[in-house]
Amino acid sequence: MYPASFDYHTPGSVQEAISLLGKLRDDAKLLAGGHSLIPMMKLRLAQPKHLIDLRKVPGLAGIREDGGSIALGAMTTHWQVESSKLLQAKIPVVSDAAGMIGDPQVRNLGTIGGSLAHADPAADMPAVMIALGVEFVIEGARGRRTVKVDDFFKGLMMTAVGPDEILVEIRVPVPPAGSGAAYLKFPHPASRFAVVGVCAALTVDGKGICTKAGVGVTGAGTKAVRAKGVEAGLAGKALDQAAIEAAAAKAADGVDVQADLQGSAEYKSHLLRVHARRAIEAALGRAKGGK
């Protein structure tokens, strides 16, 4: 199908884009990579009267180290994230997860900010962002504000980004020594979206005690969430096999697991527990290896 007719805008700055959003309001949609919005428009599930293309806005793409964080411009493509030497050296799980998204065409055009702002409940990056404890920089007519990841994902395809605001940057803290993280998913065979996905980020001390744990879950419900039961089962523990299995058994606790065409709630809860255990084991291996 073809999308409904719309007016096309190419702002030359973030401020111009924000001004257009303020003027056009509910009639406008932002275009980043387009791999979520354009299919919806072609199916007439979305019919914006105005499309605001961010691809020519300077300053919205790029990866740089800034103090104790890695700053990712919202318009940075998945391929740029996947292939970043800086991320591979400092926070490799982010590059790993980017490489699991869709296919090469999607990764070359799709953007990390567009994906996170779209907040598809089966997207990969939200679980990684939760586990790593990132912050989002959002800009609007009243200036910039920073939102912690636990306050960002509000519900099914809903985030803290207001109707007249733009997600401009994601700030990922560089983990301390003795840290490791891993993201694993059970992918849908056609779309490569996560039927379930789990990211575990761990820090262990010299005695093998887990001093910090972050665990994010995607695909299971209407939004990505923090697996607080798993985190509580890891923090302060010596991570032997029994402790890992006991913590992973809590992967579905507090998660609003939804049955869908991919499986029942019971099946998806089982997948969560299996992938939580595997992600924790992989993260622990990286932590002990110093990556």
Image: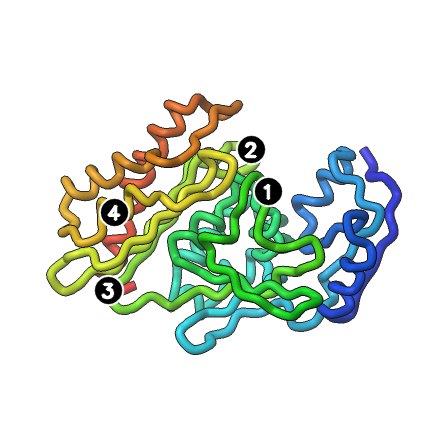
Q: Left of 96 or right of it: where is 287?
A: left
Which residue is labeled 2 in the image? Answer: 190
Under mark 3, the amino acid is Gly
Residue 154 horizontal/vertical position (percent): 54, 45
Q: Nearer the viewer, mark 1 or mark 3?
A: 1
Give the secondary structure at mark 4: helix
CA–CA distance between discs 4 and 2? 35 Å
Rate crowding at label 1 as few (under 14), some (14 to 19) or many (20 or more) other CA atoms within 10 Å.
some
Residue 89 seen: no
- Residue drawn where x is 43% and y is 78% of the image: 67
Which residue is labeled 4 in the image? Answer: 232
CA–CA distance between discs 1 and 4? 28 Å
Q: Left of 63 or right of it: where is 277?
A: left
Which residue is labeled 3 in the image? Answer: 178
Q: Residue furthest bottom?
A: 67
Under mark 4, the amino acid is Ala
Numbered badge on residue 157: 1
Quadrant housing the C terminus = bottom left
Give the secondary structure at mark 3: loop
Point out the tag, 1 or 3, that comes first from the N-terminus. 1
